[in-house]
Image (spheres, rainbow, N blue to C red):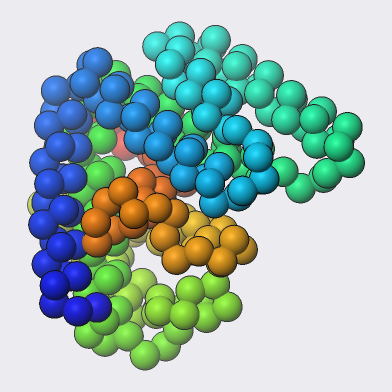
Amino acid sequence: MQASELQKRVVFGIIAAVVAGFAIYYGGSVFYLLVLIASAVASLEFDKMRGDGQISFIFCALPILLSYHPKFAALLIAVAIILVMVQQFMAKKYYSWLLITILYITIPAISLLWLRNQEHGLEAVIWLALVVVASDIGGYFFGRALGKNLLAPSISPKKTWEGFAGGVFCAVIASFIMVQEPKMILIAIVISAIGQTSDLMESAIKRNFNVKDTSTILPGHGGIMDRTDGFVLTAPIVALFYQGGVIAW
């Protein structure tokens, strides 16, 4: 990456971090609006990337709009999934990217909103964001500096095992700075590994559609999907960990 591109990546990364950090801290309607907008843009990116004429925005947005009523939101997700499956069956299509879009965007978004609304949700979401972002940054710089052994060459030709290890290392440091508890170090390792798996999953999706970035809305970073892919699997898992008392503050 050229110096100008790296500078652009850093500048817009800082701006995004400030906006997200403010929304997370403030919580309530501000965080809700940020998650809704990000999810809406991500669903539009997925629609454009698929190019199959199907519109996932309404399926993704409605449950998020009603996420303050978890049971109703869950019902809407179930109805959306059933409708998509029926539509695919009637069209004799048995592999639905539209269905994947719903699962990929809506469930992580609702998990984040639910988590933030808990008693210690602020700490939980900040911890999750720190671990995922630190893992992403560590993976990028360690991979560039030391990367030699490819992690998954058929999916992402640039990701390496050295970058993976660097991501885990940085996630552990970030977690320890916030919470000096041995259990949380182990959980940070798990979340970093899962977050990097989410990243690979998105790389596989983009490779399937032969695109480099999901959009160009974030200069130096690509699209909303490119920047939030680390939360696709980690947000629901951390929400489950919180609900089960595995993590607590």
The residue under the point 57% across, 78% down is 154
Please state the horizontal and vertical placement of residue 86, each as a whole percent of the image.
82, 28
**Lateral position of residue 162 relative to residue 198, left or right:** left
Q: Is residue 178 above or below residue 26?
A: below
The residue under the point 54% across, 10% down is 72
Please say whether residue 11 is visible from this viewpoint.
Answer: yes
Between 127 and 49, the residue placed more toward the observer is 49
**Residue extending farthest bottom:** 148
Tally the numbered discs: 0
Q: In this view, does 38 lie above or below 195?
A: above
**Lateral position of residue 154 relative to residue 249, left or right:** right
Q: In this view, does 49 lie above or below 248?
A: below
Please state the horizontal and vertical placement of residue 91, each as a whole percent of the image.
86, 37
In the rendered view of the protein, which quadrant contains the N terminus? bottom left
In the rendered view of the protein, which quadrant contains the C terminus? top left
Please state the horizontal and vertical placement of residue 5, each as a whole percent of the image.
19, 70
